[in-house]
Image (cartoon, rainbow, N blue to C red):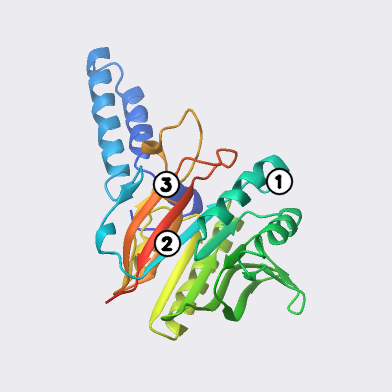
């Protein structure tokens, strides 16, 4: 369904193929006197299978490696929307994992001020370059936090009042420089938040147009489903692999999840592997590990 002029609740409903089941249930109730229980069950099962196939048609519900053997200049990236009020016993295993893995880039969203201090204290000796996600000079803050073993320059906060949902920078890798765009717009739970989410996406589109350099990288929880038509106008010329990442619930299979945590990289860079990690189940999002290759 095209989303250009739809109300917020309709776009949310159309962001998952499982809406087919709700439509079917309404039709079933309307036609209950004309069809048998057996027919209802058969049609419901058929619609369920159809919705399941559509939901996973362009997404990866599990860890998948694509062309890892040909990955030459490998860059490994970790992204995770953590729980805002994460406890110490939840953060420490995450910190230990990040130190041990030696990622090139770590992008965290949903980070409280208290968690930021703890993460910076433990990770900055291992990842000396970081974007705190706030600027006292610009009087702007966000819930994002980025770490790297390589420098960030030209850091720019796109403001929305005193908040910033999009942070752009230049990421200085040894063999290339990337225009890095990290974002975490709000979940579109009502019309006002839907408008802010969309404004952030428009800011991203404008930032991508202004990007300089050979490569661009977009990363974050966009609160935008792969089934939304908006995504096609944003990621033109970008490589990606969608991974079902929300919700992370013990009783919900990843086959029923949505790919909200995105990573796009401009061509000709390739994605060698993108893996949903079954760790850190104290968050309602899965962490994702991605390997990129910039060798042409």
Residue 263 at x, y percent in the picture:
42, 62
Residue 62 at x, y percent in the picture:
35, 42
Placement of the C terminus among the 4 image quadrants: bottom left
Specify the quadrant of the image occupied by residue 132.
Answer: bottom right
Q: Nearer the viewer, residue 270 or 203?
A: 270
Residue 55 at x, y percent in the picture:
32, 43
Q: Earlier in the sequence, mark 1 or mark 3?
A: 1
Q: Is residue 189 above or below residue 39?
A: below
- Report helix, strand or loop for mark 3: strand
Does the rendering let one see residue 185?
Answer: no
Q: What is the number of the mark on residue 277? A: none
Report which residue position mark 2 lands on.
263
- Report helix, strand or loop for mark 1: loop
Q: Pointer 2 and pointer 3: residues touching (CB < 8 Å)? A: no
- Report helix, strand or loop for mark 2: strand
Report which residue position mark 1 lands on.
85
Q: Earlier in the sequence, mark 2 or mark 3?
A: 2
Whether residue 196 sits left or right of residue 137 in the image: it is left
Whether residue 233 sits left or right of residue 174 in the image: it is left
Task: Tell me what residue is drawn at x 30 percent, y 30 percent.
Answer: 48
Whether residue 268 sits left or right of residue 259 in the image: it is left
């Amino acid at each position: 369904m095209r989303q250009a002029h739809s109300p917020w609740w309709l776009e949310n409903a159309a962001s998952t193929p499982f809406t087919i089941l709700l439509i079917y249930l309404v039709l079933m109730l309307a036609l209950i006197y004309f069809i048998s229980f057996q027919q209802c069950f058969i049609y419901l099962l058929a619609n369920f299978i159809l919705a399941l196939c559509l939901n996973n048609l362009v997404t990866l519900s599990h860890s998948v490696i694509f062309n890892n053997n040909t990955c030459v200049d490998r860059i490994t990236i970790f992204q995770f929307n953590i729980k805002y009020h994460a406890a110490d016993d939840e953060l420490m295993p995450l910190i230990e994992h990040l130190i041990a893995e030696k990622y090139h880039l770590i992008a965290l969203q949903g980070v409280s001020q208290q968690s930021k201090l703890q993460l910076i204290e433990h990770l900055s000796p291992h990842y000396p370059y970081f974007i705190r996600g706030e600027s006292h000079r610009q009087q702007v803050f966000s819930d994002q936090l980025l770490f790297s073993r390589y420098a960030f320059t030209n850091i720019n906060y796109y403001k929305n009042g005193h908040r910033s949902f999009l942070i752009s920078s230049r990421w200085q890798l040894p063999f290339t420089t990337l225009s890095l765009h990290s974002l975490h717009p709000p979940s579109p739970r009502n019309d006002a938040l839907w408008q802010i989410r969309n404004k952030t996406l428009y800011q991203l589109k404008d930032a991508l147009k202004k990007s300089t350099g050979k490569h661009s990288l977009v990363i974050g929880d966009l609160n935008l489903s792969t089934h939304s038509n908006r995504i096609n106008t944003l990621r033109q010329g970008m490589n990606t692999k969608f991974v079902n990442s929300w919700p992370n619930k013990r009783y919900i299979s990843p086959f029923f999840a949505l790919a909200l945590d995105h990573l796009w990289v401009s061509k000709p860079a390739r994605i060698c592997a993108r893996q949903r990690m079954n760790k850190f189940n104290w968050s309602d999002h899965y962490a994702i590990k991605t390997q990129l290759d910039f060798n042409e």
